[in-house]
Image: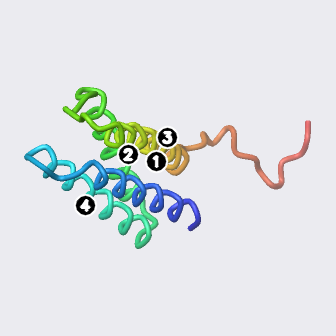
Amino acid sequence: MWINRIAAALALVSAVLHLRMGVSDIAGAFVTAMALLCVYCAVDLVRSAGNRAWLMVAVTSAGMLLAHASFPAHHHHAADQTSSMTMASVVAAAELVLAGSVVFFRTRRIPPEFRPYRLQELR
């Protein structure tokens, strides 16, 4: 499905942005783990069309946004690293909106009184 591929591409972009931040200490190892999680989500989105992959994308995107919001500086001193973090936040927000929309539309139910009947006459 095309929407799965778009979300997978966003997840791969997020992984690349996380890896651009660098691995220098314990926080860098955490960032690398998040990049690997982004790659896992991308592969899962391409392979499956179920809701589980979309829920995982929504949860990890929300977690990334919370992490980026709670540690805005991350002790980054280079302008390149802060711009990568800003772009990663933007991509995570886009992933969260996309995943939330897909999960909402896939799981909503239309009440029976609003379903059209094929043989119903117009009144």
Q: Are the residues tagged 2 and 1 within 8 Å (C-beta)?
A: yes
The residue under label 4 is 36
Q: Tell me residue 68's x, y (percent).
A: 29, 33
Secondary structure of the residue carrying numbered label 3: helix
The residue under label 1 is 99
Q: Residues within 10 Å of mark 2 (few under 14, many from 20)?
A: many
Counting residues from the N terminus, which is met first, the one under dot 4 or under dot 3? 4
Q: Tell me residue 91's x, y (percent).
A: 45, 45
Residue type at mark 1 is Ala
User: Which mark, by number, is residue 97?
Assistant: 3
Instruction: Report the Cα–Cα distance between label 1 and label 3.
Output: 6 Å
Residue type at mark 4 is Leu
Q: Quadrant of residue 87?
A: top left
User: Which mark, by number, is residue 58?
Assistant: 2
Instruction: Report the Cα–Cα distance between label 2 and label 1.
Output: 5 Å
Which of labels 1 and 4 is toward the front? 4
Q: Quadrant of residue 45?
A: bottom left
Q: Are the residues tagged 2 and 4 within 8 Å (C-beta)?
A: no
